[in-house]
Image (cartoon, rainbow, N blue to C red):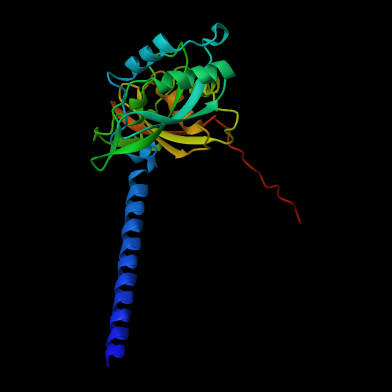
Amino acid sequence: MRRINNCILHNMKKLLFLAIVFLLIQFVSAQEMTTDSNNLVYNLNEIEQIPDFPGGMNEFYNFIRNNYKAPSKTLSDKVLVCFIIEKDGSLSSFKILKSVNVESDAEAVRVLSICPNWIPGEKNGQKVRCRLTLPISKLIYNYQIRSLSSGQKNKENVYSIAGIEKKPEFPGGIKEFHKFLKKNYKPSAEAKGLAFVTFIIEKDGSLSNFKLLRDPGFGAGEEALRVLSICPKWSPGETKGEKVRCIFSTSIPYKEPVYTTTRRVSE
């Protein structure tokens, strides 16, 4: 009888031990899942509040101009750098997407590594890590990442170009717009393919609400948005004699559509 009791007690201890081990495994797994979730890195178009430099992007580029000591031959060349803005606003995980030369690349990373903390991005009211790609140069002025989400609070109607009487127009016409894109779009050598972007042409001709529909990667999407953010104002669209907001889409770089024709063979 005593041997049976001892056997039962031994089995109960064994089951209790296994139960504790199982619970510990579940707890550790849950912690890892939470950590992974908290460490997700978001793109700008995936969050509600985009990150910002204290005082705005003009102050950021003032900081760059005061601290970036690039070789004199490459003052106007842009090093394209991808990095992560952490939840505390610090910068990490620097990656060169478009190189100028070894010295300029290293200097761009050095300057970013001593950069003051940013105001971090937010999603669902929580601070999150997010990825940002910026050109670094001694001669860059007024590059505004805020333009990526400007106009989000504007609730006025947005019209399709096909549904208005007077279509918006780039100064000099659409061919001049394509020339502007070709001249200013400078993707990294690794970037292949086209970026597709939609945006709103506001009543004053400015562009807002950029939405990246297709990103070839390697910083090409961010570069396409950068170029649109420095685009000159358009002549706005009109309907019933009133200026209206309308949506426009384009590929960057612009590529002429290819049409195929079928030749009819007589029988």
Q: Residue furthest front?
A: 2
- Taking depth in this image into account, of 44 and 262 the one nearest to the observer is 44
In this rendering, is residue 53 above or below 125? above
Q: Residue at x 42, y 21 (%)?
A: 112
The N terminus: image quadrant: bottom left
Can I make out residue 182 in this image?
yes
Q: Residue 262: give x, y in percent of width and height.
A: 68, 47
Q: Residue furthest top?
A: 72
Q: Residue 39: give x, y in percent of width and height.
A: 36, 43
Q: Residue furthest right?
A: 267
In this rendering, is residue 34 above or below 200? below
Numbered disc total: 0
- Taking depth in this image into account, of 208 and 92 the one nearest to the observer is 92
Q: Residue 130: give x, y in percent of width and height.
A: 37, 36
- Taking depth in this image into account, of 147 and 119 the one nearest to the observer is 119
Q: Residue at x 30, y 67 (%)?
A: 20
The C terminus: image quadrant: bottom right
Location of residue 132 by image quarter: top left
